[in-house]
Image: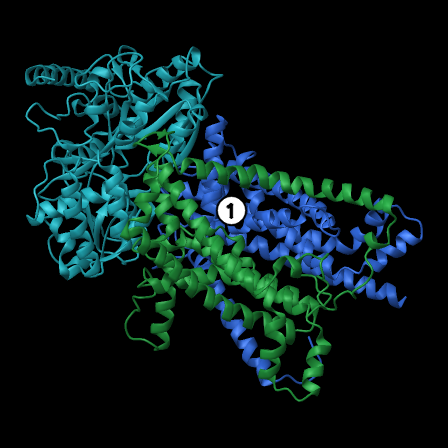
Chain colours: A green, B cyan, C blue
Amino acid sequence: MSSIPVAAPDGVRPAAVASPGRLSWAGAAAYLQAAPLSLVFICFLVFPVAATIVVSFFDYDSVRIIPTFTLENYRELLFSRVAWDTYLNTFRFAVLTWALTLLIGFTLSYFLAFHIRSAVWQIALSLLCTVPFWTSNVIRTISWIPFLGRNGLLNMVLLKVGLIHQPLEFLLFSDFAVVLALVHLNTFFMMVPIFNSMMRIDRSLIEAARDAGASGAQILWNVVIPLSKTGIAIGSIFVVSLVMGDFVTVRVMSGGQSASVGLMMANSIGLLQYPAAAANAVLLLVLVLALIAVIVRTVDIRRELAPKAGGSGSDA
Amino acid sequence: MTKRSSSSLTRRRLLKTGAAAGAAALVTGFPTVWAQKYTNITLRQFGTGTSNINAIAERCKQDLGIMLEMTATDTDAAIQRAVTQPKSYEIADIEYFSCKKVFPTGVLQPLDTKRIKYFENIVPIFITGKLTPESKVAQGTAPHTVEFVEGKASKTFAKAPTEWATMIPTIYNADTLGIRPDLVGRPIKNWRDLVDPAFKGKTSILNIPSIGIMDAAMVMESLGKLKYKDKGNMTKEEIDKTIAFLIETKKAGQFRAFWKSFDESVNLMASGEVIIQSMWSPAVTAVRSKGIPCVYQPLEEGYRSWASGLSVAAHVQGPLLDAAYEYINWYLSGWVGAFLNRQGYYSAVLDTAKKYMSDDEWGYWMEGKPAKGDIVAPDGKVMEHAGTVRDGGSFYERMGKVSCWNSVMDEDRYLLQKWNEFIAA
Amino acid sequence: MRDGKRSLGFYLLAGFFGLYVLFLYGPTITIAVLSFQGPNGGLTLPMNGWSFHWFGNLFQRQLVGDFGGSVRRSLALGAMVMVTTVAVSLAAGLAFRKRFRGDTAVFYLAVAGLVVPSILVSLGIGLMYAELGLDTAWYSSAFGAQLTWTLPFGLLIMFAVFSRFNPAYEEAARDLGATPWQALRHVVFPIIAPSLLGIALFGFTLSYDEFARTLLTAGSENTLPLEIYAMTTNITTPVLYALGTLTTAFSFIVIASCLAAVVLIQRRRSAQRRG
């Protein structure tokens, strides 16, 4: 979040001026430098996902995984109304949360990026938004009951102020509560990438637009939003994948009355039905990847993000 | 097991228990002196929070010199750890219905009952399934059905008692509905009161499929909607009907929430979100200790019961195994039993625990008598004031009215699917 | 903050920001209030008297569980994850400044770390360890599981940093005869140091509070979030809130001192520039 808003000029890059000998050295160095990262992901992401895929084709009884090939786990999943309903429900939560976090996150970032000029204040205010995340999520989760409950803090305050005359029951253990908590948890993940994108917008573009007589709304629509696209895409990826895999928030906030894919998996895991959970996981992964693919279509993240390929921010 | 052998065994056991209790009365207050043979040994134990209590580890260190490393988990995680990380523990403190799943995997070893000093004094529920010779064996995964295996190397549960035990019982209780007497406004007598429309939006049930469905079954039977052959082992058809009923009730807005862990049930009740729900006894105590009225309501249809015990991992041998036996013997020798009884649970061996409890404590917790003085929790806090009588009465009244045990059903795969349907509805 | 007059838009947005912060702090405030419950208080309202009882209780032995051990493990794991995240993402960030064969694959691999749902990572690592016959533990499997979460963040921050980084400084150093290592050590490093601090902070925080990915990979010894979770199965006293309040207070102190340090450095730099 350090903020030097002005993008580096499209300069000559070191590798381009280097001699052929240096170049091959640089190439080797790049491999060495990227190796630890790749190793971690191969060991702790690729292999585990592969293991999950393999296990999803295994059979099981109440205590064991039986390593034979079966499609039963997928059949149970794909031909079950419940599974479809659950996926649909999770998707619904994801879309709602995405829309709300986008709206809120964009507004907050806009405020921070364009109305707060001092870097220190920018940092201070964004850090202010991170403090609650330092308290263990488990503890925060418990505290929703005294906050939103029938006799909770919010109802107490609203009653006292005279806005309501009866405690609001829908505040807790409802779909409203689930979305509220998901927005609470995830807005930050939407806000940071958008803020980052906005900080890279060349301020002179806005001045130019203003000089040309554009209204505030026009600037927002024609300059700021298109140039924040990368941030919006990254934020969306965060939020969608976090919400699709959630299994704690949905259960706690709906009082166990709503289902999510993650919860369905957690239940299977609890009963040692690993292959069923694995099949579910694979399906979820495919779905999440499909969603991400849709998002990525709108913006080439690799191109926008990596510094190498025109990532100097002035390409738009 | 034939009927005759079981009842004769029970009678013999009862006689013994009586004699032992008599002897105990004579020697009250004599703590056993334990040889500190195992001061260098550490036993790693995991299990649910109900019994993996630090005070027990501390006392064990003091009495035996054995270091206990305890990890508290929830029921699901306990089963997982038992099966998937068998080398990460020596002692598994798991529930009997978990044992039905875990033991056949071979991660635990059968225990030689001859080496268990108080084995003969264990409450007969765990041996024959009957509290008294007249009792009926309750439905579900009754502990005695998974208590024994056929031999030293066997993984098959024996139909009658043998010398080889899967686990040694330590703690158990009878569960029923908890209510807020100040908010329900009428006497509660039956499981069906849980679905009384008068309490719409203020009730809750347990969201652990295998247990929650049994609570629902208690309600169904209480309503006269269905008569189960075995609530702890339903047929597909019975599951279908029960879930259909649950979905209907849920859609009518009867439930405020479903709870999964101890704290959730306490918080729901203490905050007034829920005024009647299935509950665990110490949860009721916890609500009450916050100055909020809460009653563990005995019901006409009886209780749903559970039990836990200690088992030893298959890899344990030599001095480590000796220490494990020593620890289990110590566990049954009274101090822990008294500690658990004082929290509202029951100990597997009664007469040894009695030695460590005052007459008033014993009268209140075990005999259903009004407390003469204040009843104090292990941490010194006053739990109940003089004159109070325990909900549900004495040990025999409560444990004698068990209708079914927590269980693993043959159709548990199907049950989970249907339960998910209920949650998603 | 800024010179002169502000637009209506500023006040509207500032109000919105304020409301968001209030919403964000709702649970935190609730936790703070409830941690001052009386000795007989519970985890929910109503308050049952006011006291500091639970803060004292925090440092005593609990009925179940072990704050001390799990805090130590979480701190150790947090530190391991922090150091590894900084080192690995810095290296990878440097690698991505050049083009190399397979860079796109590595990039998507890292993004996948963010995208693959946590519970799947947890399950997958658990299954993999089981199939390999290894025991999971907080310092091996959980460590790896958390890295799949923290490294992509680290890498993305590095990308952001290097996309703003002006290579002219580095080239100047090279022109003056510095080796690549010297250029890195004396030119690049000091410039990106604050961002590395950011990555470190991020890595630690994400690790310290990680739950889903650690759940099935921590093995027999719990990290703090898992321990708290397990403790909630038996403890219904505000001692958990006292822990929460202390954590929040502690984070405020850390953040305030970090900010103070930034301000101080800025002043010193501008003073040097002037002097």
Left or right: where does residue B352 sit relative to residue A284?
left
> At which x and y percent is residue B248?
17, 56
The quadrant in which the N terminus of chain B is found is top left
Mark 1 lies on residue: C210
At a point 61% along the width and 59% down the height, the residue shown is: A301
Q: Residues within 10 Å of mark 1 (few under 14, many from 20)?
A: many
Q: Residue furthest right?
A: C176
Q: Is residue C273 visible?
A: yes
Left or right: where does residue A151 sit relative to residue C251?
left
Left or right: where does residue B51 sit relative to residue A192?
left
The quadrant in which the C terminus of chain B is found is bottom left
Q: Chain of mark 1?
A: C
* Relative depth, front residue between B397 and A135: A135
* Relative depth, front residue between B264 and A153: B264
At a point 52% along the width and 75% down the height, the residue shown is: C16
Q: Secondary structure at mark 1?
A: loop
Q: Work out whether B199 lies above or below B320.
A: below
> At which x and y percent is residue B179?
20, 51
State how many labels appear. Answer: 1
> At which x and y percent is residue C228?
44, 44
At a point 53% along the width and 35% down the height, the residue shown is: C141
